[in-house]
Image: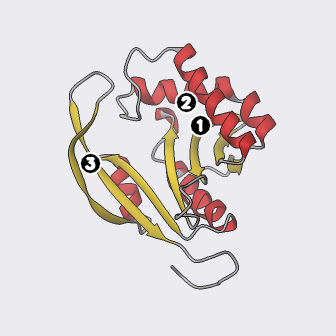
Amino acid sequence: MSEAVTIRPLSPGEAAEKVRALSEVLIDCVEGGASVSFMVPMTADKAEAFWRGVAEGVAAGDRILLVAEDAGEVVGTVQVILRQPENQPHRADIAKMLVRRNARRRGVGAALMRAAEDEARKAGKTVLVLDTVTGSDGERLYARLGWQRVGVIPNYALWPQGGLCDTTYFHKQIAPAGDGATP
């Protein structure tokens, strides 16, 4: 990863201010074929509505939104979904790990994931869950970072251009903040 790329959580105000930049990342990923809940055409209106909702979640304390920035430009993002059912206060979901196509293969995704794990740990979470397209770069990344593969659901989602794709679920057990133990 370039020395210029920084990873940081956004405050609620910053999340609202960065809706347009985050939308550009999402549009780039969907147009590049990423199956991340959206279909083409991926419009700015659709993307901005999604990110405004995320910013509201950040303001409510339901999620943490991290960004990767290179020379002030948002090139990637990931979310830690903190709000869980009453019987799962120790768990968080990792969602929408997105890296612009021109910023890939530079360690940005790995840095975002490490930062997401750190933020989850600080929030008192010890179990993390995520899903990704089976056979994707994301699946390989998560395995390299020590995530445990749970299984595959065939035909779970659609590619943005149409057609079914399988989804692989992962989990990771992380040590509580200040524990010092390796998960």
Q: Nearer the viewer, mark 2 or mark 1?
A: 2
Residue 172 placed where, x, y %? 45, 68
User: Taking 44 as reference, is 147 left or right?
Assistant: left
Residue at point 77%, 39% (across, down): 12
Q: Quadrant of residue 124?
A: bottom right
The Cα–Cα distance between marks 3 and 2, rounded to whole angstroms, is 22 Å
Packing grade of label 3 (10 A; few <14, some 14-19, many >=20) is some
Residue at point 70%, 80% (across, down): 178
Residue linked to disc 3: 134
Residue 181 placed where, x, y %? 58, 85
Q: Nearer the viewer, residue 31 or 36?
A: 36
Work out whether 80 lies above or below 162: below
The amino acid on which the numbered mark 3 sits, given as a three-letter code, is Thr
Residue linked to disc 1: 75
Disc 2, SS: helix
Query: Of all residues shown, which one is farthest toward the right?
Result: 13
Packing grade of label 2 (10 A; few <14, some 14-19, many >=20) is many
Q: Earlier in the sequence, mark 1 or mark 3?
A: 1
The amino acid on which the numbered mark 2 sits, given as a three-letter code, is Val
Residue at point 71%, 50% (across, down): 8
Q: Earlier in the sequence, mark 3 or mark 2?
A: 2
Residue 55 placed where, x, y %? 68, 34
